[in-house]
Image (tube, helix red, strand yellow):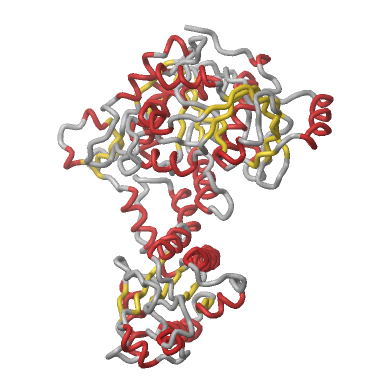
Amino acid sequence: MTPHIPINAFPQGLLVPAHRSEELKVKSVDFPSLVLRTDQLCDLELLLNRAFYPLSGYLARTDYESVLESMQLMDGQVWPIPICLDVSASFKNKLDIGSVLALRDGEGFMLAVLHVQDIWKPDLEREARCIYGTDDPRAHPGVQCFYKRTGEWYLGGRVEGIYLPNHFDFSELRLSPAETQSLFARKGWRKIIGYTTNEFLHCSHKEMLLNAARRDGASILLHSLVSEDLLGNAEHFSRIRCCQRFIESFPVNMVHLGLLPLFVRGSGPRQALLEAIVQKNYCCTHTLIDEDRIDPFKSNDVNHPYLEGEALQVVSRNNDKLGLTAVPFSRMAYLEEKSQYVEMKTIADNKNIKTITTSELKRRLEYDLHIPEWFTLPEIVSELRLTYPPRSQRGLTLFITGLSGAGKSTLAKMLYVKFMEMRTRPVTLLDGDIVRKNLSSELNFSKEHRLLNIKRMGFVASEITKNRGIAICAPIAPYEEARRTARELVQKHGGFIEIYMSTPLEVCEQRDCKGIYAKARAGIMTGVTGIDDPYETPTDAEIVLDTTNISPLEGVQEVMLYLENIGYIV
């Protein structure tokens, strides 16, 4: 088995000395600059701190091709996933072989420079087939994300680091490989099991980790993955706090918690192998392979590209080359008759198993129901309830859509008054005309601008919802794409209830309080929804109201009863 990399092999990672850093800063005025996406910042940080050892930069094309075909670099070292810098075609035209490119964070701060040694246009479908086992974005969420985020051209070359990306959260947990190795040396740890996760951890995970540690006489490095978007992401902070409570329940000096900015590709066995390499660079001697976590299809009854146990097999085949041992994740189940956890494989009758699924845990949090101590620690329950209060205390967006004259504004104003009278949450009314005047005054009524207007409204509503308020939106929102975008923005933080005012066009024309239909029929106004611009009927609205034969008060009552039935008001 190959020896571990000595601590002094990369004391500064790829960060250059101070004099070279100053030299690069002076010269950078002439360098083209690229502002990196969040996933690209993750890759850069792990390059700079040497968690991606042996890489010293972004892969050149020959190494890229070798990795796709054989999961090895050209020199034979194991590497499963291409780490290349992707850019758009327009940006690629600014570069030549030999160019020096400044790599910057979202605020424009220069973190590193790339000496461009290779530029090529990859076959993204071929890459998807090699990495994910399929090139169909409908068949694999990782492929869909890959196509959506990846630029048309790849850059390869050596990187010189100036600064690591700046982080303000949990800085004491963000140790580099060299810092972690020094820490383990001070602790006297020799055998270390690495476990990487992006989940909340409960009692079954604790028993599994204890089993593995005792079996191999090892300590544990628990790496919690950093969420992609930390801005406003309460789940990230909650998960790390829960991890801190989790490791406090272990024997002293058994578990170390670290924060790892590793972008998850969701590529099954190759993802597992990449995580194993990172854990090896963090001085682990063993890696715990959780097939369920790295396989996005594991819990679904569908055909998918990964074989049962394939991740463990792929990592195990490379044990000697990597210098660490792959350990299977042994699932644990709670037997009430024994009041303890036992290995799932030892249980003959699954009827005796007690379990709470992720969806059931979510339901219990939403409805403020009991969560038993055999499932998770009371300290973790307390943390979860702070982040995921019951529905009656969560933020909520009511998104009212329909033709002009369908009754949207009337319903919105009456609901606003109702919620203000209840005084349980702050309430904000985002009427279509109000938003147009104050947020989107420079926009016209083209499809592109209408989509942008609703995206802006959705963003504001998501901020209100995140802060546990109620946002009442009342735009026409004629396009399903825009309504779906608003839903996705809001549902990260709370409830989203779409209310479709299905009042027919002829009734809306009879009302025509703004006179827009008359102007449209007379040819004075164009782009009027329902006349010469389409309205795409919602197919997944939670509430449908036709105000032809019901009064505004009856509509309000129907909405309030619905919200009471699903727990958002009490």
Res. 447 visible in picture: yes
Q: On the picture, is 340 further left or further right than 161?
A: left
> Which residue: 29% across, 29% down?
306
Is 170 located above or below residue 502 in the figure? Answer: above
Is 54 located above or below residue 376 in the figure? Answer: above
> Which residue: 43% across, 30% down?
123
Residue 239: % across, % down: 50, 46
> Which residue: 55% across, 67% down?
460
Residue 257: % across, % down: 54, 34
Q: Which residue, as the protein is rendered here, is positioned at the far front?
A: 523
Res. 187 visible in picture: no
Is 457 located above or below residue 331 in the figure? Answer: below
Residue 287: % across, % down: 44, 23
Is 85 located above or below residue 503 in the figure? Answer: above
Observer-nearest residue: 517 or 14? 517
Observer-nearest residue: 353 or 484? 484
Q: On the picture, is 376 further left or further right than 278?
A: left
Residue 215 falls in which quadrant of the image?
A: top left
Q: On the picture, is 529 further left or further right than 441?
A: left
Residue 409: % across, % down: 45, 84
Observer-nearest residue: 543 or 98? 98
Quarter holding the C terminus?
bottom left
Count of numbered circles on the image = 0
Residue 100 falls in which quadrant of the image?
A: top right
